[in-house]
Image: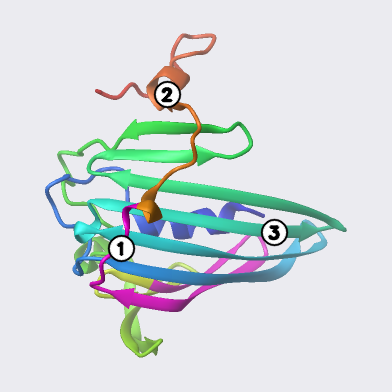
Amino acid sequence: MGKSKYIFGFLLFGMASLFAQTNRYDVKSAIVEYAIAGSGEVMGNKASLSGSSKLYFKNFGEVELSEEKIVQAANGEEEEEHSITKIVGNKKYNVDFNEKIIYQQEMVIEEENPLLNLKDSDTLISMGAKRVGTESILGYKCDIWQLGEDKIWIYNTVPLKFISKSLGLVQIQEAKLAVFNVDIKDDKFKLPPFPVKAVDDVLNIGPEGEIGPEQDR
């Protein structure tokens, strides 16, 4: 049931292949707060999810933090999820609240697509997405892009709404607050005081000695 929400995070942060010196957004800074709701039927059971998320970035995305809190309910049981992702230059940090660990990895540069940012219209088109119209969200005129059954509303490269259909679940994530080009205090980007582990170190532990691709550090 959690699959659909990760698609939105994927669109928010783009692929892990960005130049640090390249602007990731067309606006200098933003504070966006979203409401999340979803319902449907998964494997014969009625399922729902609700929650909220927020996105902060400054310096055109050089520093960015996204936090999400979701409650998923299915078959009479509830599961809470809390996640934080932070980007600083070419480093990405994922907070695991269950393990109380912060995983760090480098956002590597792909030579074939050195400027791969899924909020950019050229990249969206190259992925097969189609611009299907415009609509105002909170007074901001957004382009609406459709990719398969998913739709995303984008204002100046910043996503303000997303509809995902996955595994029988329809999820809507929509901005309820959005302000741009404002000063944001540094404490908004502060991570919990958990130990930091490099993803490379974690991936390289396994029966074959290496589970995932090794990245330059």
Q: Is residue 176 magenta?
A: yes
Q: Quadrant of the N terminus?
A: bottom right
Q: What residue type is labelled 3?
A: Val
The answer to whether the residue labelled 3 contacts the one labelled 2, judged by CB atoms less than 8 Å apart, is no
- Name the residue nearer the viewer: 155 or 68: 68
Name above or below for residue 64 compared with residue 181: above
* Mark closest to the chain's N terminus, 3 or 2: 3
- Tell me residue 107's x, y (percent): 28, 38
Looking at the rendering, which quadrant does residue 99 occupy?
A: top right
Q: Residue 212 carries which label?
A: 2
Q: What residue type is labelled 1?
A: Ile
What crowding class fits label 1: few (fewer than 14 Cα within 10 Å), some (14-19), or many (20 or more)? some
| Residue at mark 3 | 71
- Name the residue nearer the viewer: 90 or 168: 90
Please count the marks in the image. Answer: 3
Pair 3/2: label in front: 3
| Residue at mark 1 | 184
Pair 1/2: label in front: 1
Q: Which amino acid does label 2 sit on?
A: Gly
- Tell me residue 63's x, y (percent): 27, 51
Q: What stretch is highlighted in magenta?
A: 160-186
What crowding class fits label 2: few (fewer than 14 Cα within 10 Å), some (14-19), or many (20 or more)? few
- The answer to whether residue 150 of the structure is visible from this angle is no
